[in-house]
Image (cartoon, grey):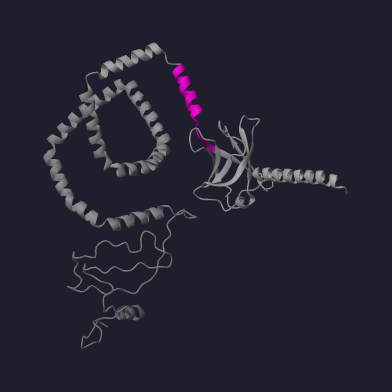
Amino acid sequence: MRPGVVRPIAGLFAILVIAGIVAGAVHLFLNGSVATVPLTVLSQRAGLVMNPDAKVKLLGVPVGRVTSIEVTSDSQAAIHLAIDPARLAEIPANVTVDIASTTVFGAKSVELVLPADPSPQTLKPGQVLDAGRVTVEFNTIFEQLSSVLAKIQPEKLSATLGAISSAVDGRGEKFGQALSDLERLLANLDSSLPNLSHDIEVSAAVLNAYADAAPDLVTTAVNATRISQTIVDEQHNLDAVLVSVIGLGDLGNDVVGTNRQPLTDLLHLLVPTTDLTNRYNQALTCTLSGLEYLANQPPLQEPGVVVSIGFMLGLERYRYPANLPKVAGSGGPQCLGLPAVPPGTRPPFLVADTGANPAQYGNQGILLNSDGLKQALFGPIDGPPRNSAQIGHPG
C-alpha cells in the first residue's frame, strides 16, 4: 500500500475509535448497559419537579431511577422505575412509596419506606406500588395563596386591619401580661404532659367503647323520649293516680297509726315463730321440694292408693319411767334424703332425745304369748298356771 493512502486510513480509524469511546462513555453514563428490573408506581400526581432519571432511594441509598412518567386512563400518574436487580431482593413486598424532595424547590425523588413489620416476601419484577404521599411544592403553596388572596377584597381587608389596629392600640402592657400569664400556664401544664399523653393514648379505647355502645345509647334516648311523651299525653290520668295515691296514703297512715300498738304486739308474737321457721328453713325447703317432686310424677294406671305393707318384729314394750315422753330433741333440721330419695334406699332413722327409742339396746324381737297359745289349744284353763316360783311372765 502506498504511503499516501495509509495516513488517511489511520486517521479515519483513530476518529472511529475516539467516537466509539465517547459513545460508550455516554452509554455508561446513562446506565444503558446496566441490567434493571421494571416497577411501576401509581400516584395522584407526580409533582411539579419529577423528571426521568430521578433517583429511587431506600433508606437514603439509591436503588434505581425513574425511566418515564405518563398519565393513565383514570387520571393518575404512572411512574415507571428501573431497579437494580441486586437491590430488589432486599426490598419487602409491603414497602410503601413517598414522592419527596429535600426542599420545596428541589427535584423530586421516589422514596421507598420500610413498614414497621416488613413482609418476608420481596418485590417482584413488574409489581405495581401505590404512592401514599407527595410533598407539596412551593409552586403549589404559592398557587393556593394566590387563589386565596384573589378572593379577598382590599377595602374589607383594610377595614379589618384598621379594626385590629384600633383594638390593640394602647393595650401592649395588657397583651404582655397576657403572654406572661400564658407562659406560666404552659409551664404548669408542662408537668402534666405525661398524664395528658397517657389520657390521649387510652382515649382511643374509651371512644371505641362509646362507639360500640352508641346504638344502645341512641335507642335508650329514643325510648326515653317516647316515655316522656307518654307521660305528657297521660298527665291528667297521672294526676288522678297521684291524688288517689295521696288519699290511700292518708288512709293507710290513719289505719296504721290507730292500730300501731296491736300491730307491734303481733310482730313481737310472731318473732319466735319466724325464728323457728328460719331455723328449720332447710327442712321445710326439702319437704316442699319433695312434695313438688311427688306432684310432678306421672299418674297411676288405675285410680286409687297403692300401699306397700310389711311385717316387722314387735317393738320393745313400754318401760316406766324411761319411756315417758319429753320435749328435748336438739338435732336441728334434717332432710333425710329429700327431696328425691333414690329407689331401693331407706332413709336413716333419726334418734332424738324425745323419750321412747325403738332402736335402743334390749329389744327382744318376737315375744310369744304362751298362755294365749294354751288357751287356743286346750280351751279355758282355770286358775293360774303352774309356776310356783312366779318367775317371769305367767305361763
Residue 380 can be seen in this image: no
Q: Position of residue 192 (x, y in %)?
A: 27, 42
Q: Position of residue 360 (x, y in %)?
A: 26, 75
Left or right of 55? Residue 148 is left
Residue at far left of view: 261
**Viewer-side residue, 57 vs 356:** 57
Left or right of 279? Residue 50 is right
Residue shown at the point (30%, 18%) measured from the top left: 164
Residue shown at the point (34%, 12%) measured from the top left: 159
* Total marks placed: 0
Q: Which residues are magenta?
A: 132-150
Residue 287 can be seen in this image: yes
Is residue 146 magenta-colored? yes
**Viewer-side residue, 192 vs 278:** 192
Q: Position of residue 136 (x, y in %)?
A: 50, 32
Residue shown at the point (51%, 27%) measured from the top left: 139
